[in-house]
Image: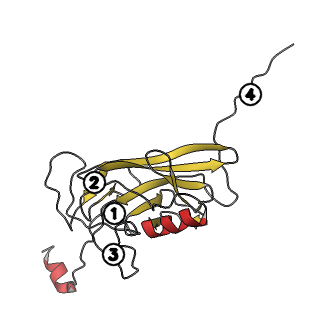
């Protein structure tokens, strides 16, 4: 009698109408000194933030994605849909409200200014696994500096330090670009208007 072996792939997650998960931690700001969450008031707990990014070109269901800290203390649970190449920011104020509403100790994102780890987890039924994480140093957590991927979703990390320049030579390096919660990482390039005659002159 022949024995037939079946090899089943682990963690194949399919949502009808959505792509498989390619959601990553994209940018983190741990030490705010200004009103980042837009509520017209500065508070260190509320104005910390973490940005996630959908690295795929298709929408992804965020149901089952959770944020945690280095000790896997749950800080926030996502829901809804993130569009292809979309960004989503969680502020400390939102984390604090979620913790209170769901019976968790309420501290907000609780990002350490001396270095920390932000973890992104995925729950599927009774199973859970870490999808992505960002471990940052004290230099990357300087006041109003963020650390993030550049380009979005890629492997390399940089410090976005236009508000507080980082002059060190240890990576991640500074970019002289500002933090960009909810937008593409990097410096926006200015657009200059030129006449058609001046453009033609370049090719004479």
| Rendering quarter of residue 174 | bottom left
The quadrant the C terminus occupies is bottom left
Query: Disc 2 or disc 3, which is closer to the eye?
Result: 3
User: Looking at the image, which residue is at 34% across and 53% down?
Assistant: 112
Going from N to C along the chain, the mark reached first, 2 or 3, is 3
Disc 1 to disc 4, how far (Cα)? 44 Å
Going from N to C along the chain, the mark reached first, 1 or 3, is 3
Q: Nearer the viewer, residue 21 or 128?
A: 128
Looking at the picture, how far across and down is residue 203, in whole percent? 15, 73
Do callouts 1 and 3 mark residues in contact (Cβ within 8 Å)? Answer: no
Can you identify the residue that label 3 sits on?
Answer: 42
Can you identify the residue that label 1 sits on?
Answer: 185
Looking at the picture, how far across and down is residue 83, in whole percent? 54, 66
The quadrant the N terminus occupies is top right
Determine whether 40 is above or below 101 in the image. Answer: below
Q: What is the crowding at mark 4: few (fewer than 14 residues within 10 Å), some, or many (at least 20)?
A: few
User: Looking at the image, which residue is at 46% across and 65% down?
Assistant: 90
Can you identify the residue that label 4 sits on?
Answer: 6
Mark number displayed over residue 89: none
Do callouts 2 and 1 mark residues in contact (Cβ within 8 Å)? Answer: yes
* Residue 156 appears in view: no
Residue 147 left/right relative to 22 = left
């Amino acid at each position: 009698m022949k024995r037939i072996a079946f090899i089943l792939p682990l963690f194949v997650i399919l949502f009808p109408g959505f792509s498989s998960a390619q959601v990553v931690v994209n940018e983190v700001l741990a030490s705010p000194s200004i009103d980042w969450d837009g509520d017209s008031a500065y508070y260190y707990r509320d104005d910390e933030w973490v940005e996630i990014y959908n690295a795929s070109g298709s929408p992804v269901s965020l149901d089952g994605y959770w944020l945690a800290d280095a000790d896997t203390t749950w800080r926030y649970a996502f829901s809804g849909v993130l569009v292809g190449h979309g960004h989503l920011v969680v502020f400390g104020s939102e984390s604090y409200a979620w913790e209170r509403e769901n019976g968790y100790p309420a501290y907000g994102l609780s990002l350490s200014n001396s270095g920390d780890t932000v973890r992104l987890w995925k729950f599927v039924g009774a199973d859970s696994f870490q999808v992505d994480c960002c471990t940052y140093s004290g230099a990357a957590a300087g006041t109003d500096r963020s650390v993030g991927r550049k380009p979005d979703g890629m492997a390399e990390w940089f410090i976005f330090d236009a508000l507080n320049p980082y002059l060190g030579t240890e990576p991640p390096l500074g970019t002289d670009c500002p933090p960009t919660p909810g937008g593409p990482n990097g410096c926006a390039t200015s657009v200059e208007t030129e006449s058609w005659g001046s453009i033609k002159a370049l090719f004479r």
